[in-house]
């Protein structure tokens, strides 16, 4: 499991300078005043009995949910138009079929995500869409890697081997954006957080065999993972079979960046 976290405090004119935050995504979310958003690609079946509870639960295919701010929902565009603009923009950024989400594939949940119980997000509009038939491939993973400050050129992301990810028994990668305005009462821009997660189960690991190389590719021994210059911390956590309560080892890679 890989997790990369980027925190950013927008300035008064965020479109002018995004720092390490991915500008292509930031411009869309700022323009549409999105409070929170999660986009997930998953393929394969998670074996809960053998692997335990998934770290990032999600249905097979493509899943998108978003919390829209009151100011945007009440604008001339309205909630439906804002949702359509968001799906079309994310479809282009992720090379996916999000623009094909129609009324039959979209719902308006609220309690499902606990929005009513979270301070600062009351009376928000929520949209949830799902495409079970969407198959993920390298065309979707490459844009995901480009959202990282160092992409796949440095840091722990350099160890990600797309071929190994898609050959596995299961994989899931997501983009989770959140604006935290719960403790901001000064009128200044709220800090935002972007979490990129990738979970991959190699075929050999799924059957209780194999090694770390099965997760990062056969060429991992020839790759030197240099630190990403803008990362404040990088961690590799290896959980043994005894600690995980299963038959296979669990490995977590994580990077945190602050701007």
Image (tube, helix red, strand yellow):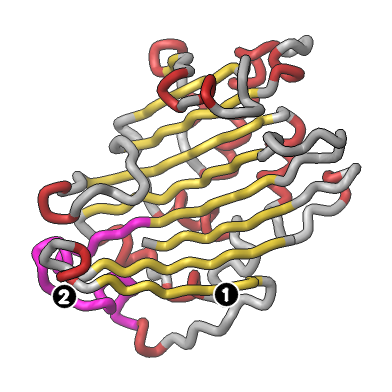
Q: Quadrant of residue 106?
A: top left
Which callout, 1 or 2, points to the residue nearer the camera?
2
Instruction: Give the camera-side residue of 51 and 222.
Output: 51
Where is the N terminus found, in terms of image quarters? bottom left
Q: Which mark is residue 35?
A: none
Q: Which residue is mark 1?
A: 153
- Of the numbered discs 1 and 2, the one sitting upstream in the chain is 1
Q: Residue at x 26, y 67 (%)?
A: 250
Q: Is residue 32 magenta?
A: no
Q: Is residue 207 magenta?
A: yes
Q: Are marks 1 and 2 in contact (CB under 8 Å)?
A: no
Residue span colored magenta: 199-219
Q: Residue at x 66, y 28 (%)?
A: 120
Q: Quadrant of residue 210?
A: bottom left
Q: Residue at x 45, y 27 (%)?
A: 113
Point out residue 160 in the picture as x, y percentages from the top left corner.
Answer: 42, 69
Instruction: Give the camera-side residue of 28 and 233.
Output: 233
Q: Which mark is residue 210?
A: 2
Q: Pointer 1: residues within 10 angstroms few (<14), some, or many (20+)? A: some
Secondary structure type for disc 2: loop
Where is the C terminus found, in terms of image quarters? bottom right
Point out residue 163 in the picture as x, y percentages from the top left corner.
Answer: 33, 66
Instruction: Give the camera-side residue of 259 and 104.
Output: 259
Q: Is residue 156 visible?
A: yes
Q: Is residue 206 left or right of residue 7?
A: left
Q: Is residue 102 visible?
A: no
């Amino acid at each position: 499991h890989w997790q990369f976290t980027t925190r950013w405090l927008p300035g008064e004119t965020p479109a002018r300078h995004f720092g390490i935050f991915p500008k292509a995504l930031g411009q869309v979310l700022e323009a549409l005043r999105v409070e929170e958003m999660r986009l997930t690609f998953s393929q394969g079946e998670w074996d809960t009995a053998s692997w335990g509870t998934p770290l990032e639960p999600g249905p097979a295919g493509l899943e998108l949910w978003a919390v829209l701010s009151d100011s945007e929902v009440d604008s001339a565009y309205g909630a439906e138009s804002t949702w359509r603009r968001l799906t079309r923009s994310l479809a282009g950024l992720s090379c996916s079929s999000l623009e094909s989400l129609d009324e039959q594939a979209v719902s308006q949940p609220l309690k499902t995500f606990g929005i009513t119980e979270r301070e600062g997000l009351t009376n928000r509009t929520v949209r949830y869409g799902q495409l079970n038939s969407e198959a993920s491939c390298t065309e979707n993973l490459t844009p995901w890697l480009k959202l990282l400050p160092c992409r796949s050129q440095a840091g722990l992301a350099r160890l990600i081997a797309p071929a190994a990810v898609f050959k596995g028994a299961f994989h899931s990668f997501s983009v989770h954006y959140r604006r935290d305005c719960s403790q901001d009462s000064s009128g200044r821009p709220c800090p935002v957080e972007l979490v990129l997660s990738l979970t991959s189960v190699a075929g050999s690991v799924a059957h209780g065999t194999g090694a770390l190389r099965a997760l990062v590719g056969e060429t991992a021994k020839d790759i030197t993972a240099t630190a990403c210059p803008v990362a404040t911390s990088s961690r590799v956590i290896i959980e043994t079979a005894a600690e995980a309560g299963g038959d296979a080892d669990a490995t977590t890679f994580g990077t945190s960046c602050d701007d």
